[in-house]
Image (cartoon, helix red, strand yellow):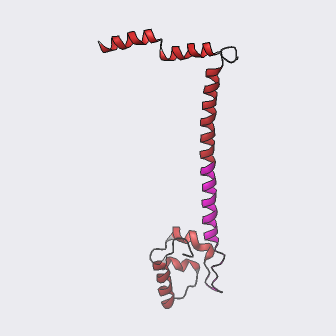
Amino acid sequence: MALPGIGEAKAQAIIDYRKDNKFKDIEDIKNIKGIGDKRFEAIKDDLAVSGQTDISDLKSVKAKANKKAKDTIKSSKAKANAKSKKLQERMDDSMDKAMNDEGKVKGSMDKMKDDAKEDGSSKAKAKKDKKDKK
């Protein structure tokens, strides 16, 4: 496909139209069924009514490829930033757990006490479980 949105069927319609009509202006292409204002805007930079036909340097195809590349880069950056932020949060959480209130690294005993607080002591947990069953 040489022009965006112009497949085999529309290309044949253009050829058929050209057999019976002469293109006087590039906007005449809108006389072909299926080519309206939106499609015309996408391809108008590559249309000409005189001169040689040259499809080697289509501006509309380049513009579409550039847009797709930019969108891919934006998406990749957004994903990388989200992943980086998530990792930073996990690191911060780990650091918070490893540090005491004075900013010093907790000893193994302090870590065990914190874990016990989070899980509840085994006696308190057993009482709670027993109470919940009743």
In the image, residue 86 lies in the stretch drawn in magenta: no
Image coords of residue 71 (percent x, y): 60, 55
Residue 112 in sight: yes
Image coords of residue 100 (percent x, y): 65, 15
Image coords of residue 29 (percent x, y): 52, 79
Majority SS type along the magenta span? helix
> Which residue is found at the position 52% from the left and 14% from the top?
116
Furthest toward the left, the residue is: 134
Image coords of residue 78 (percent x, y): 61, 46
Q: Nearer the viewer, residue 27 or 15?
A: 15
In the rendered image, the quadrant that contains the N terminus is bottom right
> Which residue is found at the position 59% from the left and 73% from the top?
44
Residue 17, above or below 64: below
> Which residue is found at the position 63% from the left and 42% from the top?
81
Residue 32 in sight: no
In the rendered image, the quadrant that contains the C terminus is top left
Residue 132, above or below 68: above
The mark total stands at 0
Q: Say which quarter of the image contains residue 66.
A: bottom right
In the picture, measured across the screen, residue 96 lies left or right of residue 30, that is: right
In the picture, measured across the screen, residue 130 lies left or right of residue 32, that is: left
Q: Say which quarter of the image contains residue 129.
A: top left
Furthest toward the bottom, the residue is: 19
In the image, residue 51 lies in the stretch drawn in magenta: yes
Q: Nearer the viewer, residue 133 or 43?
A: 133
> Which residue is found at the position 49% from the left and 71% from the top?
36
Magenta stretch in the rendered image: 48-76
